[in-house]
Image (spheres, rainbow, N blue to C red):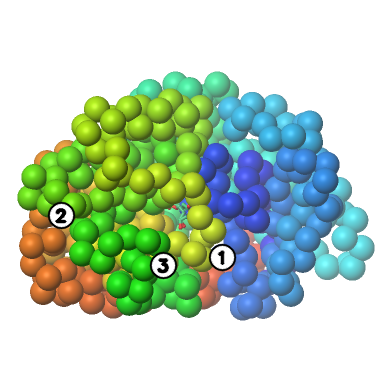
Amino acid sequence: MRRLAVLSLHTSPLAQPGSGDGGGMNVYVRELSSALARAGVECDVFTRAASDALPASVTVEPGFRVHHVAAGPPVPMAKEALHGVVDEFAEGVLKVLDGSGDGLAYDAVHANYWLSGMAGHMIKHRLDIPLVSTFHTLDRVKAESSPEEVEADSAVRRAEEEARIIRCSDTVLASCSVEAEQISELYDADPSRIRIVAPGVDHAFFGPGHRPQARRALGIPPESPLLLFVGRIQPLKGVDVAVRTLAAVANAHPDARLAVVGGPSGPRGADELERTVALVHGLGLDDRVFFVPPRPHELLSTYYRAADVCLVPSRSESFGLVALEAAACGTPVVASDVGGLRTLVDHGRTGYLVDRSDPEAFAGWVRQILAEPLLAQRLGTGSVLRSRRYTWARAAHLLSEIYEDLTAGRLVECS
Ligand code: UDP
């Protein structure tokens, strides 16, 4: 295996995660491509050119390039409209692949998210190479937890497209066993073609540090309890639960604060932010909740280190990089008992899982962590140790084995 075409149609691995279309998928594509390149697999990542000021290609590091492909107008487009430019994108990718001119063939195409999956499906058949798919989120999984999100998102019957892509993927990657089960149950996928490859965390950036120093850097008083929420602001992420959790611990901890790091995302993001600000105001928490615009990924460790506890109240989560990054920094996580968070949080050892998006339940564990410094310390140490299982190098190693197997075998036929 020498060369891989990675598709990331709707969002660039070079974009700032934490708002708009930028989130875990950007981090995943960037970190995995970088780790694969270091492991000897060349990665060409293709993303839609959202501006005509972008160069046709950028070398991020040796063996990892990002190509900006013209598809639709060279301006930011709503994700909901992008299915209309998939064919143009696929043709643009094929043109770059054909024109690479160095005689090296691409051994596989790896598509991220269903829009890239549609393009990957076309490219697989045109080049006769294996298709690997990572969905990041799936329509039918979202439909179970947040039907209102799906309505806004399913203009072209996304779930049917996902099912079609799954049927023709030589391998479908899942981040954890919960996601693997969801893919096989909700999409009737052949379990033998689903492989679990957990994402990683960059331990060079995300590691334990000195809390008072992190607090000083952020201008947060050393003694005030600090709760942290990091991520895109949209209903699925449950930032309202984080605010209500702060309200529920306020009696016991009148100086507690909540930092919300991230910005609005998706068609309902702006409304969700507005609702959250109104909720903060209504609960009389204006001087206790501070909103921080998206921060560069590698600077987030200061926030994790400064916090006493990281809240991840998502209503659905295929993996949950934020929970892993917090853990790597030694910060206990209290998370919803959903999706990948179930694998990431070891209940009682690294943090706590809460059955529903119930602020009282979140607050119960937060109060306990704040009241018992020794418990907090034990959870923090447990978190760091457990997080060490997850590295991008390990993910890249597993993936390169999968690609090798695929190039040696027969392609799955379209059904
Ligand atoms: N993130 C970031 N800056 C921010 C907010 C978030 O770099 O201001 C990153 C965060 O570190 C994590 C990713 O965005 O790596 C979010 O991934 P997660 O899996 O938690 O959620 P997703 O966006 O995939 O739903």
Mark 2 Cβ inside 8 Å of ligand 1 = no
Locate residue 2, reporting x and y percent.
71, 72
Q: Which residue is mark 3?
A: 217
Q: Residue at 17% x, 40% y: name it.
A: 247
Residue 114: where, in percent of width, then height? Answer: 56, 39
Q: Which sits in the foreground, 156 or 189? A: 156
Q: Which mark is residue 31?
A: 1
Give the mark nearer the N terminus: 3 vs 2.
3
Q: Is residue 393 above or below residue 30?
A: below
Q: Kindly report the distance in space between the C-alpha atoms of the residues bearing marks 1 and 3.
A: 27 Å
Left or right: 210, with 200 as reference point:
left
Label 2 belongs to which residue? 366
Closest to the observer, 255 or 93: 255
Q: Secondary structure at mark 2?
A: helix
Residue 160 visible? The answer is no
Q: Answer with the quarter of the image where residue 403 lies.
A: bottom right
Which amino acid is tagged 3?
Ala
- Mark 2 or mark 1, which is nearer the start of the sequence? 1
Task: Look at the picture and state if 281 lies above or below 348.
Answer: above
Pick the quarter of the image with the C terminus: top right
Q: What is the crowding at mark 2: few (fewer than 14 residues within 10 Å), some, or many (at least 20)?
A: many
Badge 2 amino acid: Val
Q: Do the CB atoms of the residues marked 1 and 3 lie less than 8 Å apart?
A: no
At label 1, which amino acid type do we have? Glu
